[in-house]
Image: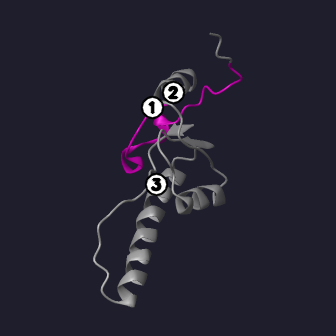
Amino acid sequence: LSPVCLGSLRRAAKIMEENDFQKYIEIEEQYVRKICDDIIKLKPDVVITEKGCIDLAQHFLMSANISVIRRLRKMDNNRLAKATGAVIGHRPSEMTENHIGTRCTLFEDAR
């Protein structure tokens, strides 16, 4: 379990020629791939985000057998982190396997 942010990528870019658009798509794919590779190295089973997760990132993670849960409320994300021993992080490149929650068992939220 590793709560991280893989929200939408919003950048301003000037596209003057058809090749510029293709180059931009390639750069975006490389960027998303690097973030996903950093997450995959941590070996989580599930990645949870409070925001969205772009389809390309979800595809890369699902290919590595990692499930993605998106748009979880902050309070619920904090509860899951506490229940599993995970550390909520925003930069996968700076995280280690120690940040992954390993106390994940069957639990119930009794209100």
Q: Nearer the viewer, residue 52 or 101?
A: 52
Does residue 21 appear left or right of residue 43 in this picture? left
Circle 2: residue type: Ala
Q: CA distance from mark 2 to mark 3?
A: 19 Å
Look at mark 1 in the image and give the residue it sits on. 87
What residue sits 28% from the left and 77% below the top?
Answer: 14
Numbered label tally: 3
Look at mark 3 in the image and give the residue it sits on. 38
Circle 1: residue type: Val
Q: Quick one: SS at disc 2?
A: helix
Q: Earlier in the sequence, mark 3 or mark 1?
A: 3
Does residue 79 appear left or right of residue 96 in this picture? right
**Residue 46 belongs to the span the image colors magenta:** no
Above or below, 55 against 77 in this view is below
Q: Which residues are magenta?
A: 86-107
Query: What secondary structure is the magenta-colored segment mainly?
Result: loop
Does residue 74 appear left or right of residue 45 in this picture? left
